[in-house]
Amino acid sequence: MRPFEYRRAEDVAGAVAAVADHPDAVYLAGGTNLVDHMKLGVATPSLVVDIGHLPLDQIVELPDGTVRIGATVRNSDLAAHLMIRQRYPVLAQALLAGASGQLRNLATTAGNLLQRTRCVYFQDVSMPCNKRDLGSGCAAREGYARYHAILGGSAGCIAVHPSDMAVAMAALDASVVVMGSTGERSIRLVDLHRLPGDTPDRDTVLTHGELITAVDLPQLSFSQHSAYRKVRDRASYAFALISVAAALDVSDRRDAAGGPTIRDVRIAFGGVAHKPWRATAAENFLRGATASVEKFREAADVELAQAETLRDNAFKVTMVRNTVASLLADLTRRQVGDIGGDLAAKEQNP
Ligand SMILES: Cc1cc2nc3c(=O)[nH]c(=O)nc-3n(C[C@H](O)[C@H](O)[C@H](O)COP(=O)(O)OP(=O)(O)OC[C@H]3O[C@@H](n4cnc5c(N)ncnc54)[C@H](O)[C@@H]3O)c2cc1C
Ligand code: SF4
């Protein structure tokens, strides 16, 4: 590991000034991602500014009903918080689907958002990787790409963002509060992470020195009807092959065919792109439609129309489609009861 200077930040302004003044300084939160990268030689900062003790570890409700989550709130504490479990179950479930208990005890809200891709070539400094070393090439395109992107990739990079928590936050329309040397700004979470394009070395729109101080969750009238489903190679301690976060508002009013109607919906996909993928085309397709497995599958297909697959990751298209259908069918049942053997049968035998 390259030698580095360690500083413990005393306040937000001091932390921002310390990092902004050094071109290769970084923030250290829980360290569960950064320290691994320093050991592997993927990250080589000369200055590490520890923000773990800043007073950013509270979860509070603002007067307008927004829930503000401090940047250093630990993943375990966020998942266990009663207001989060009751109001935003999708978020609690996404957090608990990630990593392990020990890691969640250390990992922070902001660190989770800014964790870097798990592409094996990114973590291996002997391999070409445009994200680590822009212009060196992309070993994954002709290599092991089972976990890689099917949406929004580029010739230069097909990595995916690995966070579970961020997918739930994207579905919930969260915003990120950021402090920089010129002041504070708020960024919609869906705009925080970038698609790779020609500059896959940049994961986010943050500029050097900007510190995430909080994540805001706006009120959503049906957020209690939300859930997260993660599909992975083993039942725990594995990153997502794909995941789906959704919130659904279904009316008991039946259409001509006897099915309930969708009033509103939020959907985001994980494990498919360089960023948490908000499925707005699928949402638009479903608003006002009948809640049925056919419609849920069609909605996924609308979103996946632009999918570009490789030999090893083409299975993700079917996996996303089936997961969207089964998750939305569950959310429908929980709100309006069993909506008929027809739906259940079709879900079992697509
Ligand atoms: C074995 C293993 C399995 C895992 N499995 C999963 C999984 O299944 N799902 C999942 O979602 N995650 C998983 N993770 C990743 C884990 O969630 C992240 O490592 C963790 O959330 C990172 O948080 P941290 O506080 O430790 O960040 P750190 O490692 O401290 O920092 C990560 C990055 O964020 C930057 N940063 C941190 N805080 C701020 C801030 N406030 N403002 C600006 N920049 C900041 C740091 O500079 C660094 O670049 C796994 C990790 C491991 C090691
Ligand atoms: S997919 Fe991206 S992160 Fe992986 S090797 Fe290619 S450029 Fe690097």
Image (cartoon, rainbow, N blue to C red):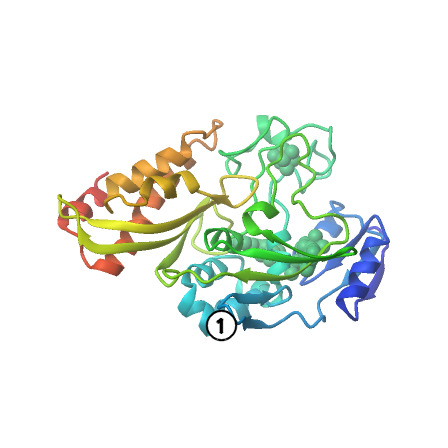
Q: Position of residue 205 (x, y in %)?
A: 66, 45
Q: Position of residue 209 (x, y in %)?
A: 77, 53
Q: Position of residue 92 (x, y in %)?
A: 46, 63
State the quadrant of the C terminus: top left
**Residue 181 in view in this figure:** yes
Q: How many marks?
A: 1
Instruction: Say which of 7 and 226 sits in front.
Output: 226
**Quarter holding ligand 2:** top right
- Neighbour class for label 1 at 10 Å: few (<14), some, many (≥20)? few
- Residue 322 drawn above or below residue 81: above
What residue appears at the point 37 percent right and 34 percent down from the top-left corner? 302
**Residue 31 in view in this figure:** no
Q: What kind of element bears circle 1?
A: loop
Can you tell which quarter of the image residue 55 is in?
bottom right
Q: Position of residue 265 (x, y in %)?
A: 36, 50
Residue that numbered label 1 is attached to:
81
Residue extending furthest toward the front:
64
What residue appears at the point 53 percent right and 33 percent down from the top-left corner? 152
Left or right: residue 22 versus residue 285 is right
- Residue 343 drawn above or below residue 100: above
What residue appears at the point 60 percent right and 68 percent down from the top-left corner? 73
Q: Is mark 1 within 8 Å of ligand 1?
A: no
Q: Amino acid at mark 1?
A: His
Can you tell which quarter of the image residue 83 is in?
bottom left
- Residue 51 drawn above or below residue 195: below
Left or right: residue 7 versus residue 318 is right
